[in-house]
């Protein structure tokens, strides 16, 4: 990979990793569901007035928007509000790789490699270790919401696989329209107009920055760069960079909030990262091992 493209990949890693810190800052002052609606409203407007609608059926765009916007972040933002640490959230979300693998087997007929199956078992063992640490209801519920968010991301990936290659920025902008009204309606019902009014009244310049960062930094720019790289390099070359997202998430959360992780969480995180590495590099490792064996 050329050096400029490596730098672009690292920019995306930073944008996505630091996004978990931005979410935690945002939900401190704004109702989480309403904040999510603002994120997607800003991601869609004004871009949809300047970018043509992608050549994708509306039913696919609606399913993608519901999975990625309404369900994924409709679970993640409240989970962080309820106490899921930003760094841990960045790690839990990476389990989407294995949920994507399982859904691809069920709906696309794909056959996983043995290394991917082993990686999934190790990674989910890590999540189980983290779950043991968070067995109280107050701590376990946000963790389960984070896992549910990762499942929704995986569903969006399957829809994306069926769509094929499209202009990423246009696709993200137009599908961002989908979750705005459902999120706003759910916010009115669950959080209430009083909480929304209070959140808007207490909004600061930092709140505005967080919304703009989430909408354009993490959503539009991050997804656009990632798609740009995937169009130019094999997925196996680009995908390993996503392993750095939890690293950025943990480091950013440590410096922003002094978040510390327990021994159980360290062990669980190590198992999840090991599983992810097997998922990404397993084929390459197996090929190198068999090639090096004597005849």
Image (tube, grey):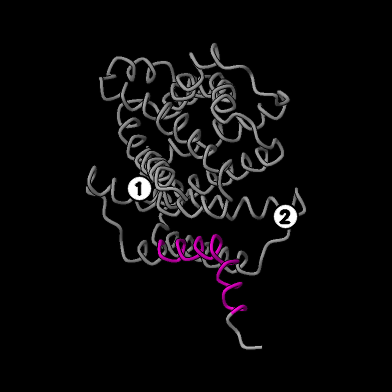
Left or right of 252 on screen, residue 193: right
| Camera-nearest residue between 178 and 224 | 224
Secondary structure at numbered mark 2? helix
Residue 152 pos. (x, y %): 58, 41
- Residue furthest toward the bottom? 295
Secondary structure at numbered mark 1? helix
Q: How many marks?
A: 2
Q: Is 139 included in the stretch rendered in magenta?
A: no
Residue 221's mark?
A: none
Residue 105's mark?
A: 2
Q: Is 282 included in the stretch rendered in magenta?
A: yes
Up the image or down, 131 lies above or below 51; here it is: below
Q: Residue at x 47, y 51 (%)?
A: 1
Residue 183 pos. (x, y %): 52, 24
Q: Residue at x 54, y 13 (%)?
A: 50
Up the image or down, 24 lies above or below 143; here it is: above
Residue 54 pos. (x, y %): 65, 23
Up the image or down, 271 lies above or below 70; here it is: below
Q: Earlier in the sequence, mark 2 or mark 1?
A: 2
What's the magenta region? 269-291
Q: Residue at x 42, y 58 (%)?
A: 135
**Which SS does the magenta portion mostly show?**
helix
> How many neighbours does mark 2 have within 10 angstroms: few (below 14), some (14-19), or many (20 or more)?
few
| Camera-nearest residue between 174 and 235 | 235
Residue 249's mark?
A: 1
Q: Residue at x 48, y 26 (%)?
A: 190
């Amino acid at each position: 990979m050329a050096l400029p493209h490596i730098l672009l990949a690292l920019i995306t890693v930073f944008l996505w990793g630091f996004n978990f810190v931005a979410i935690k800052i945002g939900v401190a002052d704004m109702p989480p569901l309403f904040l999510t609606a603002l994120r997607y409203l800003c991601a869609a407007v004004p871009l949809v007035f300047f970018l043509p609608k992608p050549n994708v059926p509306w039913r696919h765009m609606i399913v993608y928007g519901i999975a990625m916007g309404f369900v994924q972040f409709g679970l993640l933002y409240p989970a962080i509000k309820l106490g899921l640490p930003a760094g841990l959230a960045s790690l839990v979300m990476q389990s989407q790789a294995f949920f994507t693998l399982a859904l691809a087997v069920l709906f696309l007929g794909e056959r996983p490699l043995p290394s991917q199956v082993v990686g999934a078992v190790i990674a989910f063992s890590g999540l189980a270790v983290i779950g043991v640490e968070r067995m109280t209801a107050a701590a376990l519920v946000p963790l389960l919401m984070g896992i549910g968010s990762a499942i929704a991301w995986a569903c969006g990936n399957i829809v994306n696989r069926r769509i094929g290659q499209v202009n990423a920025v246009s696709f993200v902008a137009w599908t961002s329209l989908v979750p705005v009204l459902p999120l706003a309606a759910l916010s009115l019902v669950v959080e209430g107009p009083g909480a929304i009014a209070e959140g808007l009244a207490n909004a600061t310049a930092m709140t505005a920055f967080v919304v703009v960062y989430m909408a354009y930094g993490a959503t539009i720019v991050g997804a656009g760069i990632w798609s740009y790289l995937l169009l130019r390099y094999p997925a196996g070359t680009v995908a390993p960079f996503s392993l750095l997202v939890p690293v950025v998430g943990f480091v950013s959360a440590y410096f922003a909030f002094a978040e510390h992780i327990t021994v159980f969480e360290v062990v669980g995180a190590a198992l999840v990262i090991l599983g992810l590495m097997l998922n990404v590099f397993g084929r390459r490792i197996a090929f190198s091992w068999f090639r090096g064996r004597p005849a």
